[in-house]
Amino acid sequence: MNSEWTPRYLAMQQLGREAGKIALDYYNKGAHVETKPDDSPVTIADKSAEKHLRDQLAKLFPGDGFLGEEYGNEPGTTGYRWIIDPIDGTRCFIRKIPHWATLVGLEFNGEIVAGIAYEPVFDRMYQAAKGTGAFCDGQPIRVSGIPKLADCLACYSGFRFFQQAGKDSQFHKLLNAVDRARGFGDYYGFMLVAQGSCDLMVDHGVHIWDIAALKIIVEEAGGAFSDWSGGNDLERPDCVGTNGKVHAETLAILRG
């Protein structure tokens, strides 16, 4: 890992944990839900957690840029940009389903170089930095070695996202091509890929803050992460993460 990234990598772990615990307090006691213009839900927990991250990171690293789900884009001057989703899985958060996480990605000159996904309910931290491997609570994690799509366990987000995008036929083809499929959506499906518990995760309707941190964790765990064209455009609404061995086969179906 580039030594210049180290202070930021350490800070994202500490502050991501702090922000997650701020959100966890609201999760435990309940939080009022509002609806954003895109009809997605938001709570004071989302806003408070992101504000904490922005405020503290700005103090530590003046001049860094920010892009967050709740407070938008703030250009910087250092080449670094923090990409934040304070609560990935807000619908789970609202319904008291424990699989939600605080995501922080670090971008340097347009490249994602580090990321964390912190699950407050379980006090569990997934993390990775370029060239160092991927870890869960300090233990190395690795994608599966399953070589054939027909033997894979696939994860996916809600079917409605694919249907609204006119991609339901590709979605059905993919599910018919694998051995089993489970609807472990949001960050969680990608972390299951990274730790080898499932073999691919397909999603549609994402934003860059949903996936910036997850991309490097999957890749550092030995997997592959791309948009459905096979490129690395994190601004596209479609993405897929796999164990690498079935990536080309998966993309062939998604492109159909």
Image (spheres, helix red, strand yellow):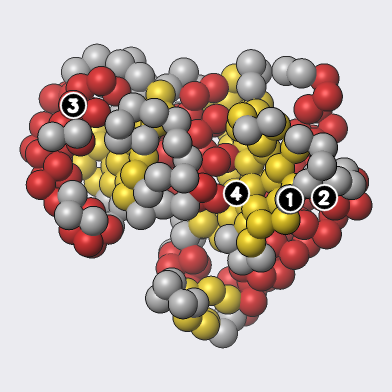
Sequence-first tag of 1 and 4? 1
Cα distance between the residues tagged 2 and 4: 14 Å
Residue 217 drawn above or below residue 132:
below
Would you name the residue on which mark 2 appears?
Answer: 57
From where the camera sits, is residue 234 visible?
yes
Sequence-first tag of 3 and 2? 2
Disc 2 is placed on an element classified as: helix
Q: Quadrant of the N terminus?
A: top right
Which circle, 1 or 3, is nearer the viewer? 1
Which circle, 3 or 2, is nearer the viewer? 3
Mark 1 Cα shell of 10 Å, populated few (<14), some (14-19), many (≥20): some
C-beta proximity under 8 Å, tags 2 and 4: no
Q: Position of residue 237 (x, y in %)?
A: 37, 49
Q: Quadrant of the C terminus?
A: top left
Residue at 55 percent across and 41 percent down: it is 212
Cα distance between the residues tagged 1 and 4: 19 Å
Cα distance between the residues tagged 1 and 3: 37 Å
Residue 252: mark in rendering: 3
Q: Position of residue 72 (x, y in %)?
A: 64, 61
Name the kind of residue labelled 3 in the image.
Answer: Ala
